[in-house]
Amino acid sequence: MQKLIGIKKINIAVFISGNGSNFKNLIFYSLKKNSKYRIKLLISNKRNAMGLQYAKKYKIKKKIINYNNKKIAEKNILSELKKNQIDLICLAGFMKILSGNLIKRFKGKIINVHPSLLPKYKGLNTHQRAIDNNEIYSGCTVHYVSTKLDSGKIILQKKVKIFKNDTAKKLAKKILKQEHFLYPKALNKVLINL
Ligand code: GAR
């Protein structure tokens, strides 16, 4: 933890692979007056991830991790986490699966946002699968990361109604909007128990 003029701030690393709208949103919340955390590090497995622009804009240290070899990739990640004294990891559209070793090293300290009402629709292509199954609701979930994919303890969820004319793209957009409310709220809940 970082001591800032008497206030202990939690050091967070955000992991992304793409647009980084959740990353940008978490930066926004971290800059609020009474925020208990600061985003100290951005990890991306994609050199051209759109979200990297926010690290530049807000002067957050970024590290691009080459995933050609997962073992080496995670070794580099662990070294960055240590170097930057990271207390908590927020996965935000990170499309790589972390190994059991890394998860155990950060036990109870990795959270993720997933675009479905878990335990329904783990994995990829969640929106189309929910539409194809004629679901009335989908939504988003913030959960702890465990060694089983998208199966860790749920922190918070938000339901989103699926309309008859919703396409996967439309639904993804509606859900993403809710993720931007849910993730900071869930993060605050996690910080109380950290
Ligand atoms: C979000 O909808 C997030 O829930 C999803 O990727 C999107 C990332 O958007 N994550 C997963 O599907 C993880 N399995 P963003 O890059 O704009 O934050």
Image: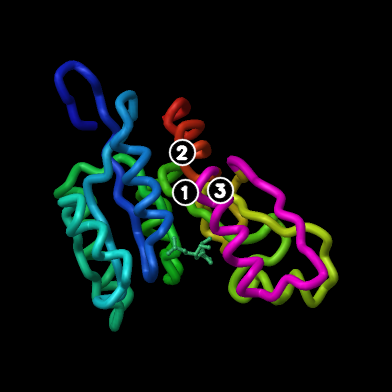
- Work out whether 10 lies above or below 110: above
Which residue is painted at 64% across and 70% down in the image?
170
Q: Which residues are magenta?
A: 155-181
Number of the label disc, if any, that sits on residue 187: 2
> Could you tell whether 61 is left or right of 49 in the image?
left
The residue identified by callout 1 is: 111
Observer-nearest of 92 and 165:
165
Q: Is residue 77 visible?
A: yes
Mark 1: give few (<14), some (14-19) or many (20+) Cα within 10 Å.
Answer: many
- Work out whether 185 lies above or below 95: above
- Mark 1–mark 3 CB contact (< 8 Å): yes
3D distance between C-alphas at marks 3 and 2: 10 Å
Label 1 amino acid? Ile
- Mark 2–mark 1 CB contact (< 8 Å): yes
- Mark 3–mark 2 CB contact (< 8 Å): no
Q: Is residue 156 magenta?
A: yes
Mark 2 falls on what kind of element?
helix
